[in-house]
Image (cartoon, grey):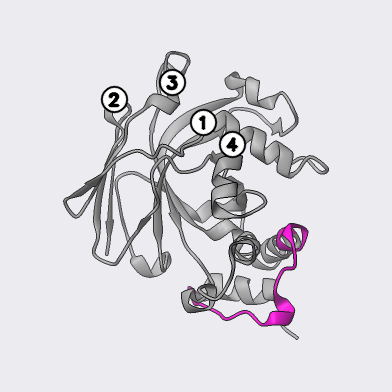
Amino acid sequence: MTTLAEKLANAWVKKDLIDVKPEDFPKNRKDSHLIQEQFHKILKKKTVGWKIGMVTKNLQDGAKVDGPMIGRIIDETVLMNPLKIQYSKVPHCILECEFALKFLEDTKMIPGTEDRKGNYEVFISLELVSTRVKPDFKKNLNSRELMFLNVADNGGAGAIVIGDKIQNLHNINLNSIEVEVNLNGKITGAWEKRAHPTEAIKCIINEFKDNPVTFKKGDWFMTGSIIQPIKINKGDKIKVDFKTLGKINLDFI
């Protein structure tokens, strides 16, 4: 019998969407992480870091979930600004604006790591959240079930777009940075529910406290959206202005 991890890996390769049988469904967060781990063993793609969402307890409580949405970043999904991308490569895409950390040395995620700011550089970035599961199937799930499935589905990872490196980081309060998203001429701004990247580090430390993950030198860490996530369609043109930090342009073709 084909496992959920096998179905998700096959869907990733084919850029396909699947249903999930009740007997395959992850029962809890531990199940979700195990399925995600099996997914990567089957896929055999190089991974270059992690992504995280739903970082703060306020966000988790508001969404009625019991933890963050975490996935691994696959090397070939790391893209550079500016970019034109085929929508079929990230089906049912959701856009998020984030700060991406790039680690300068191997770093184990243990308590205190959040204070070691010399371990990483910070870049402006976009995350393209995607799925391997049919959206109509997801509509019938409650919040906890949806989170378990999303974690199993590699945290909804689609692709990331890396922009400029932030200079003079020690002089900048990232929580005060304004961002403006121009989607086909419609403007949206920053989100009051945003979390600071150090909170994302604390969150991944807590999530894997029994078996800490290690970021290798050069790995990326996507630290959660600073805007309300935006649904993307084929043909959309996006211009994201991080004000003094730089801009990212992205067209879906």
Tell us which disc is closer to us: 3 or 2.
3
- Given contact means CB atoms under 8 Å apart, are the residues at marks 1 and 2 in contact? no
Q: Earlier in the sequence, mark 4 or mark 3?
A: 3
- Given contact means CB atoms under 8 Å apart, are the residues at marks 1 and 4 in contact? yes
Looking at the picture, which amino acid does disc 1 mark? His
Pointer 3 local density, CA inside 10 Å: few below 14, some 14–19, many at least 20: few
The dot on residue 196 is 1
In the figure, 78 relative to 143: above or below?
above
Looking at the picture, which amino acid does disc 2 mark? Thr
Q: Residue furthest left?
A: 185
Determine the CA span between mark 4 and mark 2.
23 Å
Q: Earlier in the sequence, mark 3 or mark 2?
A: 3
Query: Would you say residue 3 is visible in this rendering?
Result: no
Q: Which residues are magenta?
A: 15-33
Task: Give residue 247's position: percent from left, percent from top.
Answer: 28, 36
* Residue nearer the viewer, 147 or 51: 147
Question: What kind of element bears circle 1?
Answer: loop
The residue identified by callout 2 is: 244
Question: What kind of element bears circle 3?
Answer: loop
The dot on residue 173 is 3
Q: Earlier in the sequence, mark 1 or mark 2?
A: 1
In this rendering, position of residue 174 left or right of residue 244: right
Determine the CA span between mark 3 and mark 2.
12 Å
Residue 111 occupies which quadrant of the picture?
A: top right
At a point 68% along the width and 71% down the height, the residue shown is: 5
In the figure, 8 relative to 190: above or below?
below
Determine the CA span between mark 1 and mark 2.
18 Å
The residue identified by callout 4 is: 200
Tell us which disc is closer to us: 4 or 2.
4
